[in-house]
Each structure stands twice: as structure tokens, then as C-alpha cells.
Image (cartoon, rainbow, N blue to C red):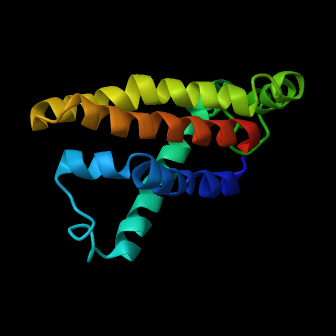
Amino acid sequence: MNFLIFFLAALVPTFTGFIWYGPLFGNAWMKELGFTKESLEGGNMFVILGLCYVFSLFIAVFLMPATIHQMGVYSTLAGEPGFATETGDAFAYFQEFLANYGDRFRTFKHGAFHGTLSGIFLALPLLAINALFERKSFKYVAIHAGYWIVTLAIMGGIICQFGM
């Protein structure tokens, strides 16, 4: 497992957000929330970006089994005797499985597909449900859901291509 790829993929939301909530949709986003550039000043950006990075790491870890099909086999076998110590029959089977099928569906494109699906079928409904209760507009949901769909697609692509 390439743990460094989690740390790289966790940077994606910050970079995507800089563009999405800046030149692309920054004015529309601020208008929807009643923000001005002045009202956004003064926050502790070190804390904000630091916590966003930690939460982005959580997302990257979630995307690994969502984008890499071989993780399903791993999770099925992980509790078998000897697997954790790399001595059991299940571990030998997993090694053989990876040797034969470890490269299947391991492309950026495939990961981006699953990241997009995660955005549409997980992030969008979560955002929309909150927005309904908060009485937010469709535009608000579209801006945020669009951001997460694009962000999760890029993160999923990176993780699928390089994550294992």
C-alpha cells in the first residue's frame, strides 16, 4: 500500500478549492452565502487549512476501497488465519491473485469514474439534504456538489493509479 499517495491526494481539495471558489465560482459562492471579501478575512488560515487537510486524508482513505477493486479481495481475506503475519493460505492466495489480476482497472480514468460516482451518489445527496433543511438554493448545492464531484474524481484517479 502506498501511504504517500494518501498525503498527495489529500492536497487535491485545497488546490481544487482555490480554483473553484476563486476564479471559477468565487463570486457566485460568496453571493449565495452573503459573504464579502472583507467578511472572509481574519480567519486563522493555518487552522482552517490544517483541519481541511486532515479531513481530506480521511476522504483519501475512503476512496481507496471505493476505487481499487482488489481491496475487496483484501478485506475479504484480511481476517483469515495467517494473513496478517503473511504466512497463511489466504495470504498466499492474495499474492497469487495480485500477481494475476492486480493490474486490472488500475488507471486514473477508472479511479476518476469511481470518484465521480462517489461525488454524485454520496457527496451530492449529503450536501442537498443539508441544503434543504438550511433553506439553501439550488445554485448553492450545484456549486458545492460540482466542487466535490470534480475533487473526488481527481482524488479517485490519483489513488486508483498509484495507491497500491
**Relative height, residue 84 to residue 117 (above, below):** below
Quarter of the figure with the C terminus: top right
Q: Quadrant of residue 82?
A: top right
In percent of width and height, residue 2 lies at: 72, 50
Horizontal side, residue 137 vs residue 73: left or right: left
In percent of width and height, residue 96 lies at: 86, 26
Count of numbered tags: 0
In percent of width and height, residue 35 lies at: 20, 58
Viewer-nearest residue: 90 or 124: 124
**Relative height, residue 49 to residue 113 (above, below):** below
Horizontal side, residue 67 vs residue 39: left or right: right
- Which residue is found at the position 16% from the left and 36% from the top? 136
Viewer-nearest residue: 91 or 87: 91
Q: Quadrant of residue 121?
A: top left
In percent of width and height, residue 153 lies at: 57, 34
Horizontal side, residue 101 vs residue 25: left or right: right
- Which residue is found at the position 69% from the left and 25% from the top? 110
**Residue 68 visible (yes or no):** no
Horizontal side, residue 15 vs residue 140: left or right: right
- Which residue is found at the position 39% from the left and 64% from the top? 51
**Relative height, residue 105 to residue 31 (above, below):** above
- Which residue is found at the position 88% from the left and 22% from the top? 100
**Residue 109 visible (yes or no):** yes
